[in-house]
Image (spheres, rainbow, N blue to C red):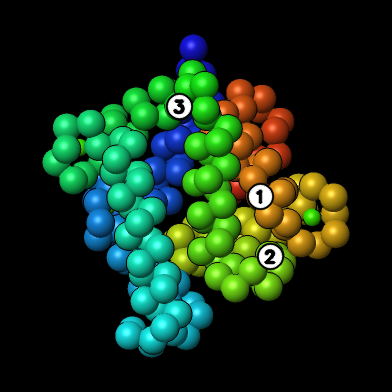
Amino acid sequence: MVSELQKRKWTTLFAVFDANNNGVLDQKDFEQFVQRLAQVRGWQPGSLEYSNIHDKQLLYWKRVQEAADKNGDEKVTLEEWLEYHEQLLSAANKYNEIESLGSAVFDLFNPDGKEKMTAEKWEELFVTCNIPRVYVKYTFPQLDLNGDGILSKDEVLQLISEFYLSDDPNAPGNLLFGPHI
Ligand SMILES: [Ca+2]
Ligand SMILES: [Ca+2]
Ligand SMILES: [Ca+2]
C-alpha cells in the first residue's frame, strides 16, 4: 500500500529531476543538470570534468529510462515514475537498487572521492537542482545524523533509502530535498 507521504516524496524527486520544468523527464533534463553543475563548479564545456559528468549523467538517465519508461517513448511521465516507485517498494532487491542509484548521485558531487559533503557543498547541490538554498540551513543539521558537520556516503545512502521507502513522517530522510514534505 502506497501512502500519500510516499507519493508526495516521489513527486518531489520527479520535480527535482525535471530540470526544464516541462512536466516530463527526458534526456534534456539531465543535460541541463550538467550545464548547471558546470556553471556552479566553473567547468568549461569540453573540459575533462565536464565530459566526465556529462557521460555519468547520460548513463544515469538511461537507467531511469530503462526502469520507468514503460511505453518506450524516451520520456518518463509522472504517472510512469510513480508506477516505477510503487513497484520498487515491493521489489525484493529494492535496497540494492536504491543504494546503487544513491551511490551514483553521491559520486556525481564527489567525483574524485576526496571532497567532503559539508553544508556548503550540499547547498551547491540545491543550487544545481534548482531547490531553494535557504532550506539547507534548516535541513542540514537534521540530515547530518552523527552531527560531525559532514554528510558521509553512508549517511546519504541511509537518507536516500528513507526518502524512497519510509512511511514514517519523522524520518530525517524525508527532508533530503527540502522541508516542504
Ligand atoms: Ca523535463
Ligand atoms: Ca514514457
Ligand atoms: Ca555526518
Position of the C terminus by quadrant: top right
Residue 74 at x, y percent in the picture: 18, 46
- Point out the quarter of the image occupied by ligand 2: top left
* N-terminal-most mark, 2 or 1: 2
Q: Nearer the viewer, residue 98 or 8?
A: 98
Which label was assigned to residue 88? 3
Residue at the spot x=67%, y=72% of the render? 115
- Mark before the other along the chain sequence, 3 or 2: 3
Q: Residue at x 68, y 73 (%)?
A: 114
User: Mark 1 sits on what residue?
Assistant: 156
Residue 134 is left or right of residue 7, and the answer is right
**What's the residue type where badge 2 is placed?**
Met
Q: Residue at x 36, y 29 (%)?
A: 84
Rendered location of residue 150, percent (x, y): 76, 62
Residue occupied by mark 2: 117
Give the Cα separation between the discs numbered 3 and 2: 28 Å
N-term-proximal mark, 3 vs 1: 3
Residue 145 appears at what percent x and percent y?
Answer: 79, 47
Q: Tell me where residue 130 sits by quadrant.
A: bottom left
Q: Residues within 10 Å of mark 1 (few under 14, many from 20)?
A: many
User: For disc 1, does the CB lie below 8 Å from ligand 3?
Assistant: no
The amino acid type of the residue labelled 3 equals Leu
Where disc 3 sits, the SS reads helix
Mark 3 or 2: in front is 3
Q: Does the numbered disc 3 mark a residue whose Cβ is under 8 Å from ligand 2?
A: no
**Quick check: 124 above or below 92?**
below
Asked if the residues shown at circle 2 and circle 1 are in contact, with their CB atoms under 8 angstroms apart, the answer is yes
